[in-house]
Image: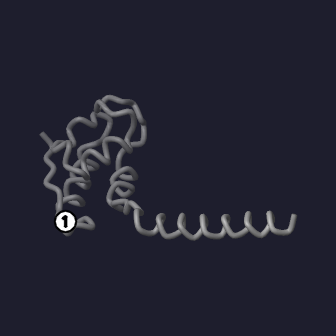
Amino acid sequence: MLKAVLVALGLGGVSGLVLGIAAKAFAVKDDPRVADVTGMLPGFNCGGCGFAGCSGMAEALVTGKVKSIAGCRASRPATRKAIIEYLSSKPGPDGKTIEVNDL
């Protein structure tokens, strides 16, 4: 009985160690600009831009999949301008900025 408990503890410890190392080695680093742009968007999650919510639009802007903020019809012109200025001045983890327009 004691032997079975020790084997289970050993296997659990080794598995935990392997999972901990794998979590560090394969961690995905999030771009903090996505959260910042999501906070700048109106937060209506209306879907008018073609994305399920504002976070989808923000991620598409930050990754460069969408080059125009005009898809967000619920945002005000001042908000659009602030997002454009933010993305053109704030580099991401890769050191690059994003060029977005308001057309």
Of residues 1 and 27, which is closer to you in this image?
1
Per the image, label 1 sits on a secondary structure element best described as: helix
Circle count = 1
* Whole-percent x, y for residue 63 in the image: 24, 51
Position above or below: 77 against 31: above
Of residues 73 and 59, which is closer to you in this image?
59
Residue picked out by circle 1: 89
Q: Residues within 10 Å of mark 1 (few under 14, many from 20)?
A: few
Q: In this rendering, would 89 be left or right of 33?
A: left
Q: For the N terminus, give its image quadrant.
A: bottom right
Q: In this rendering, would 61 be left or right of 46?
A: left
* Whole-percent x, y for residue 30 in the image: 37, 60
Position above or below: 51 against 14: above
Q: In this rendering, would 63 be left or right of 28?
A: left
What sort of colour scheme is used for the picture?
one colour
Of residues 5 and 65, which is closer to you in this image?
5
Name the residue: 27% across, 33% down.
73
Name the residue: 69% across, 70% down.
10
Q: For the C terminus, give its image quadrant.
A: top left
Name the residue: 22% across, 58% down.
87
* Whole-percent x, y for residue 16 in the image: 61, 66
Name the residue: 13% across, 54% down.
99
Kindly identify the amino acid type of the residue bearing the numbered disc 1: Ser
Quadrant of the image occupied by residue 49: top left
Position above or below: 74 against 88: above
* Whole-percent x, y for residue 25 in the image: 41, 68
